[in-house]
Image: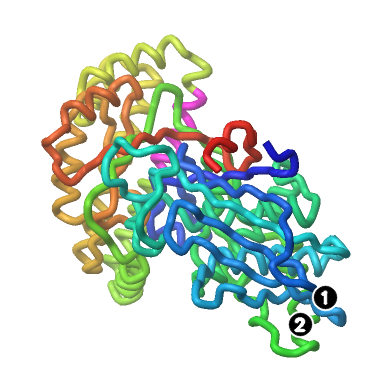
Amino acid sequence: MTPSRRCFSAPGKALLAGGYLVLDAENSSFVTALSARIYAITCPSPSLDSTLPTITVLSPQFQEGEWSYTVCQSPITGFVSLPAITPDRRNPFVQSAIATVMNYLSATGTLQTTLPSLTMTILSDNAYHSQPSDAVPRFNKHPLPITAVPKTGLGSSAALTTSLVAALLSFYGDMNPDAAQTKVILHKLAQLAHCNAQGKVGSGFDVACAVFGSIVYRRFQPSIISSLPPAPTSFEAEALYLLSLQKVIEADWNVGTRECSLPRRMRLLMGDVTGGSETPAMVQMVLRWRKDGGESASAVWTALGKANENLIAAMIGLGEQAAKDPEEYDAFVDEVLKVGASDVAQLGHSNGGRTGELFVQVVDAIVEIRFNLRSMTAGSGAQIEPVQQTKLLDACSALPGVLGGVVPGAGGYDAVCLLVAEAAVDAIAKQTEGVFENVRWLELREEATGVREEDMLVIEEFL
């Protein structure tokens, strides 16, 4: 093993509650970090340029997975530009992550005086992309460029950006991404880099989850990021940009990132559904409907927000109840294993105690969330919960051990997400095998930790 190598990883996500409403800063969402992670490994390397340092990013699992940049720092302003050594290949997330971190370090005066060249290797768990079969090696290699391999909707760009930012802060800024204060800075830099790469200011829940893990999330005001001036084209503009960048990162974003994990013995079961959805187009359709839909659209929006809050409160309450009264909690979970979602209410009202009340609240909230998402589907024309997904979720919700399910995030045809009792997972997979032809259950579980440093001994064998 090369001692100078270090590895940082960030998780994927599932937005269980908060689709579309997460765009408003007054709404809370529940986003769960998953065991699928993207890894960024740093290693000092010889420069590809005779006079200037270079940064090369390798993604060996995909064809044409190499992006190299010359690091050019202005001796007058300190602004860092990144001319591409591989101009025929473009990865906006890689380039934006590097540029954002390097310019932040330059703006704060913490960028090393003599910059070493760097090679970063990216590895992504198989769950991020649809696989030809289950019998593939870890970090499976694909015969196509990364842009041509279908995704499963777990937030790969956010996890990639976050892991790169963490690795760069460690390598060039000598900062510890695990430290609480550094993690706050890392979060802001990753949000900014991700927004720049996308060309718009998104809700940011995926990046926040990649940094902090499973959380109740409330977004920042978009004006914080949009206030940053465009890429500079003069010395005066470069100086202004660096000053503005430092101010943006040091500002109070007033973002909500409360830790919140799934209750004990509960699990998310993620299904990769053969299909595809255009999330940006769907978001535009929903926002247009909200603007033009009058009181009916407003009523749906409000009702969905209330249902989301009920689900979040119930999940928090169950976590507390599992610790406060573990015997009652475990006894009720054992009963949940025997029935489908519609019968949980009867169980809870008859003999479940406080635990039963909270489980009923979970089931009722999921039913209400789905009802309002279908209303939003009908009103906006965006296929948030299409008819095919409705049939699939209804069938799954009838299986023993299932509390309910949603089409996560923005919805569509990409995936389904079930909230189940953990001991029922194998039985659910067996019962549905061959029944739902377009669904492949992913080998995923909640892994509540966000960005972290990995043991290189574990990663080394895959390089």
Q: Amino acid at mark 1?
A: Gly
Q: Say if mark 2 contacts mark 1, CB within 8 Å.
A: yes
Q: Position of residue 119 (x, y in %)?
A: 66, 56
Front residue (pair 230, 150): 150
Residue that numbered label 2 is attached to: 238
Q: Residue at x 49, y 27 (%)?
A: 319
Q: What stretch of residues is rendered in magenta?
A: 309-320
Q: What predominant SS class does the magenta segment belong to?
A: helix
Looking at this view, name the residue that lies furthest to the top: 327
Check the image and tell me how it is coloured: rainbow
Q: Is residue 315 magenta?
A: yes
Q: Residue at x 33, y 24 (%)?
A: 421
Q: Residue at x 24, y 55 (%)?
A: 413
Q: Could you tell whether 429 is left or right of 184 in the image?
A: left
348 in relation to 15, above or below: above
Is residue 368 visible in this depiction of the protein? no
Q: Is residue 366 magenta?
A: no
- Position of the N terminus, as image quadrant, is top right
Q: Which mark is residue 78?
A: 1
Q: Amino acid at mark 2?
A: Glu
- Position of the C terminus, as image quadrant, is top right
Q: Residue at x 53, y 69 (%)?
A: 92
